[in-house]
């Protein structure tokens, strides 16, 4: 990954941060994005640069705002690897799903993937090399109740990935999706609380009986496992993979 620049959205926490660390370790220069406390983000940025001897920059664009996304891509410059990872969740029955949550999930989890992709593709086409890796979910392939916006957005990401892969197939660019099962990150910590409310059961029972119920291994997928798949998809060995949704879900979608 030496001399390559990787832009990872939503990389101040969880899976995105793990992916940023893995690309930095592999020698790529990094552009971080995401929310958080300024001093904490600066500490993350400086630590990553020191640990791996690469350039690490940060842009705080809000992925629900197309103009901020355009500014972030301009700031990043020559992007070789784009990882669309930023995402949020909200758990609610359809009929009471808050309208602003629906709009935010579609904007951040789906539309931002379109906005970043359209902005980086001209650069990738010029170089005849590029890697776009979209972090969808097992919920990009199958559904669960109470997650209508998330499931709709993630299915959309899988479909968008296929279209982009076909448009770029002869240009040295690959576009793939990773579909993780449950990974223990702040996003899932919040869902454990939300599901406890919806089902009216204790938090500790939610992990085994609700969260990991569809995941046959009964183990969380790790951040490192997802990150190593992202690094593989960006490698030359993965040049023959495009338009694919790679499942990493402890057997969830095998049922
Ligand atoms: P997380 O909450 O730990 O991290 C989300 C990141 O996105 C953070 O850096 C946050 O600041 C950023 N973000 C949120 N809204 C943003 C916005 N409007 N603009 C810019 N950045 C924003 O979550 P995570 O679990 O690491 O999830 C990362 C991705 O992986 C998401 O797309 C999620 O849907 C997907 N995913 C997660 C799991 C899981 O079990 N954790 C499983 C499958 C897929």
Image: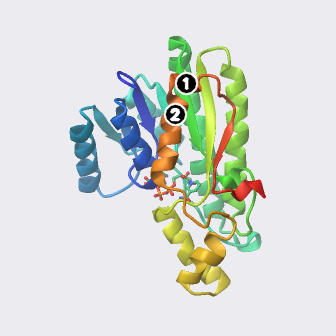
38 and 141: which is toward the camera: 141
Quarter holding residue 77? top left
SS for dot 2: helix
Residue 250 quadrant: bottom right
Instruction: Give me the residue at 55% from left, 32% from top.
Output: 233
Find residue 179 and report its horizontal and vertical position in percent.
63, 48
Quarter of the figure with the N terminus: top left
Residue 62, can we see it?
Answer: no
- Any atom of ligand 1 within 8 Å of the CB at mark 1? no
Determine whether 208 is above or below 46 in the image. Answer: below
Q: Nearer the viewer, residue 67 or 51?
A: 51
Looking at the rendering, which quadrant does residue 168 occupy? top right
Instruction: Say which mark, if any, is on residue 93.
Output: none
Image point (68%, 40%), residue name? 245
Number of numbered discs: 2
Measured in 3D between alpha carbons, the distance from the residue under mark 1 to the one under mark 2, in whole angstroms, is 7 Å
Secondary element type, mark 1: helix
Residue at image location 58% in from the left, 28% down from the top: 118
Q: Which residue is mark 2?
A: 232
Residue 40 point in image, percent of width and height: 26, 55
Q: Are marks 1 and 2 in contact (CB under 8 Å)?
A: yes
Q: Earlier in the sequence, mark 1 or mark 2?
A: 2
Residue density around tag 2, few if under 14, some if 14–19, many if 20 or more, within 10 Å: few
Look at the image and tell me whether residue 46 can be seen: yes
Residue in front for this viewpoint, 91 or 28: 28
Q: Position of residue 223 (x, y in %)?
A: 47, 53
Q: Is 218 on the left-hand or right-hand side of 29?
A: right
Residue located beneath label 1 in the image = 237
Q: Please, is residue 34 above or below residue 73 in the view? A: below
């Amino acid at each position: 990954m030496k001399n390559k620049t990787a832009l990872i959205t939503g990389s101040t926490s969880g899976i995105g941060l793990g992916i940023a660390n893995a690309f930095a370790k592999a020698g790529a220069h990094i552009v971080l994005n995401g929310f958080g406390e300024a001093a904490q983000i600066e500490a993350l940025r400086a630590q990553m640069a020191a640990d791996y001897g690469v350039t690490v920059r940060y842009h705080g664009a809000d992925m629900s705002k197309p103009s901020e996304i355009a500014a972030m891509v301009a700031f990043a410059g020559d992007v070789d690897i784009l990882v669309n990872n930023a995402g949020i969740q909200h758990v609610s029955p359809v009929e009471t799903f808050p309208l602003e949550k629906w709009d935010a999930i579609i904007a951040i989890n789906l539309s931002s993937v379109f906005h970043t992709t359209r902005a980086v593709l001209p650069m990738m086409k010029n170089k005849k090399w590029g890697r776009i890796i979209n972090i969808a979910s097992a919920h990009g392939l199958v559904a669960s109740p109470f997650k209508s916006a998330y499931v709709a957005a993630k299915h959309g990401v899988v479909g968008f990935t296929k279209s982009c892969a076909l448009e770029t197939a002869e240009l040295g660019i690959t576009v793939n999706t990773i579909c993780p099962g449950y990974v223990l990150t702040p996003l899932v910590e919040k869902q454990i609380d939300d599901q406890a409310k919806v089902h009216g059961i204790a938090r500790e029972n939610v992990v085994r009986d609700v969260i990991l119920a569809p995941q046959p291994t009964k183990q969380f997928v790790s951040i490192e496992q997802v990150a190593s798949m992202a690094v593989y998809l960006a490698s030359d060995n993965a040049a023959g993979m495009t338009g694919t949704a790679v499942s990493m879900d402890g057997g969830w979608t095998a049922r």
